[in-house]
Amino acid sequence: MSVRKIVTVVEEIRAEGGRALDRPARIAVVAAVIENPWAGQGFVEDLAPGIEANASDLGALLAPAVLDALDAPAEAYGKAAIVGLDGEIEHGSGLIHTLKFGDHFRKAANATTLLPAVEKRGPAGVVFDIPLKHITDATIRSHHQTIEVRISDAPHPDEIVIALAAAAQGRPQQRLAPLSTEQ
């Protein structure tokens, strides 16, 4: 795995809707800008060797880093794979949609739900939104949220941005009724 750089973003919201929060709402993102393991190979039929060689190491690198950046227990989480223009969306999907990647985050966060994800292809500086959901119950509406991310010089055409996001709470000032009220 060839990592060009790691980018860490921490957002701390102190007011929402014109009203101060009792405690700041924190969301952290840690992204690794990596060389696409399939760059320059044309169509690769079997992605398994590249997934095996990289996915677990990426999860092991990013999971503790995003929780350290959050500096609080995670209540919501998500992931992203943004592929440079010379790659395929399947390249990013292959790296993040495997237990070899996601289980590092689930174990570190004491989570049980599937990680919501975004995958897309784009040029350097492309904006992407990482969806987040509750770490143990994906039906808890208060924790359905997104964070917008942009890395000005990534991904290069032969790179992939792999990112994890964690939130220490649900949306600021959330007040939707629980899903159970509609059943």
Image (spheres, rainbow, N blue to C red):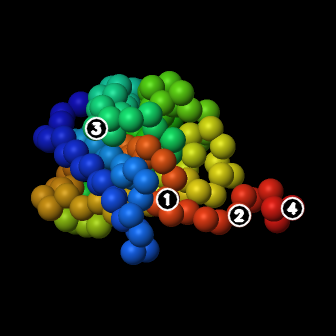
Q: Nearer the viewer, residue 66 or 22?
A: 22
Amino acid found under the numbered disc labelled 1: Arg
Gap in Å between the C-alphas at discs 2 and 3?
30 Å
The earlier-in-sequence mark between 2 and 4 is 2
Where disc 4 sits, the SS reads: loop
Mark 2 highlights which residue?
Answer: 177
Residue furthest to the right in view is 183
Where disc 2 sits, the SS reads: loop
Q: Nearer the viewer, residue 74 or 46?
A: 74
Give the number of the disc on residue 154. Answer: none
The earlier-in-sequence mark between 2 and 1 is 1
Residue 124 lies, in percent from the top left, at 18, 63
Q: Is residue 121 visible?
A: no
Decide: marks 4, 1 in contact (CB < 8 A)?
Answer: no
Q: As displayed, is residue 119 above or below residue 78? A: below
Give the number of the disc on residue 183. Answer: 4
Amino acid found under the numbered disc labelled 4: Gln
Where disc 3 sits, the SS reads: helix
Amino acid found under the numbered disc labelled 2: Ala
Decide: marks 1, 3 in contact (CB < 8 A)?
Answer: no
The earlier-in-sequence mark between 4 and 1 is 1
Residue in the picture at 38% in, 35% down: 72
Mark 1 highlights which residue?
Answer: 171
Residue in the picture at 18% in, 36% down: 3
Mark 3 highlights which residue?
Answer: 69
Q: As displayed, is residue 84 above or below residue 50? A: below
Residue 13 lies, in percent from the top left, at 34, 59
Residue in the picture at 61% in, 33% down: 112
Q: Residues within 10 Å of mark 3 (few under 14, many from 20)?
A: some
Would residue 109 be found to the left or right of residue 129 on screen? right
Look at the image and tell me in which quarter the C terminus lies. Answer: bottom right
